[in-house]
Image (spheres, helix red, strand yellow):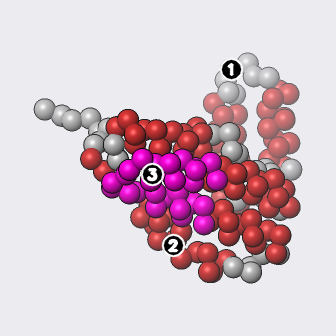
């Protein structure tokens, strides 16, 4: 939940300090600080032009920190899907194969999928090309146009 993210973000920097090698420690702590700063600015209930300018700069700085994290720390560590994700992918593949039994299926495609599963968990990398990350840059301008997010809702109103 969002409140858990906020609580964790407020406490995690001293917990992670010096846990990683120095070159990665600095990158991770900087990223966490940038995330905490951005989150605090996003939650403000009253903005001025000055705070929105700071928010815009904080957003740019967060983007820089994310790219630095991906280019240094993420490259240094091999990350892969969790065992439960690997198992779920196997179940999904088996179910798709079972559904396709009665139909004419491409045997090469199903054997490729079986090979993927036998090779073990997939390598997972942090993807910065997602809409969620892309949309962060729009927050300061959206606050300029519509105001802070505590005074309106996008929820459908029923009569």
Number of numbered discs visible in the structure rendering: 3
Q: Position of residue 33 (x, y in %)?
A: 60, 66
Secondary structure mostly taken by the magenta-highlighted segment of the chain: helix
Q: Earlier in the sequence, mark 1 or mark 2?
A: 2
The secondary structure type at the circle numbered 1 is: loop
Q: Position of residue 66 (x, y in %)?
A: 69, 53
Residue of label 3: 50
Residue of label 1: 103
Residue at image coords 74%, 50%: 67
Quick check: can you spot residue 113?
A: yes
Q: Earlier in the sequence, mark 3 or mark 1?
A: 3
Name, please, the residue furthest toward the front.
50
Q: Nearer the viewer, residue 115 or 102?
A: 115
- In which quadrant is the N terminus drawn? bottom left
The secondary structure type at the circle numbered 3 is: helix
The residues tagged by marks 2 and 3 sit, at their Cα atoms, a distance apart of: 24 Å
Question: Does 50 lie within the magenta span?
Answer: yes
Q: Residues within 10 Å of mark 1 (few under 14, many from 20)?
A: few
Name, please, the residue furthest toward the top.
104
Q: Nearer the viewer, residue 48 or 130?
A: 48
Task: Please report the bounds of the magenta region as a residue range.
Answer: 33-61
Relative horizontal placement of residue 113, taking residue 99 as reference (left or right):
right
Question: Does 13 lie within the magenta span?
Answer: no
The residues tagged by marks 1 and 2 sit, at their Cα atoms, a distance apart of: 54 Å
């Amino acid at each position: 939940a969002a409140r858990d993210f906020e609580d964790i973000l407020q406490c995690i920097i001293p917990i992670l300090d010096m846990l990683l090698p120095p070159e990665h420690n600095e990158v991770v702590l900087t990223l966490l600080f940038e995330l905490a700063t951005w989150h605090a600015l996003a939650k403000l209930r009253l903005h001025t032009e000055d705070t929105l300018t700071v928010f815009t700069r904080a957003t740019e700085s967060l983007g820089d920190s994310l790219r630095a994290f991906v280019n240094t720390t993420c490259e240094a560590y091999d990350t892969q899907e969790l065992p439960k994700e690997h198992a779920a992918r196997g179940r999904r593949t088996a179910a798709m194969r079972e559904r396709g039994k009665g139909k004419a299926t491409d045997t090469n495609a199903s054997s490729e999928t079986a090979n993927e599963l036998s090779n073990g968990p997939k390598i997972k990398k942090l993807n910065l090309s997602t809409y969620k990350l892309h949309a962060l840059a729009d927050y300061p301008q959206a606050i300029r146009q519509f105001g802070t997010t505590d005074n309106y809702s996008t929820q459908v109103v029923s009569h």
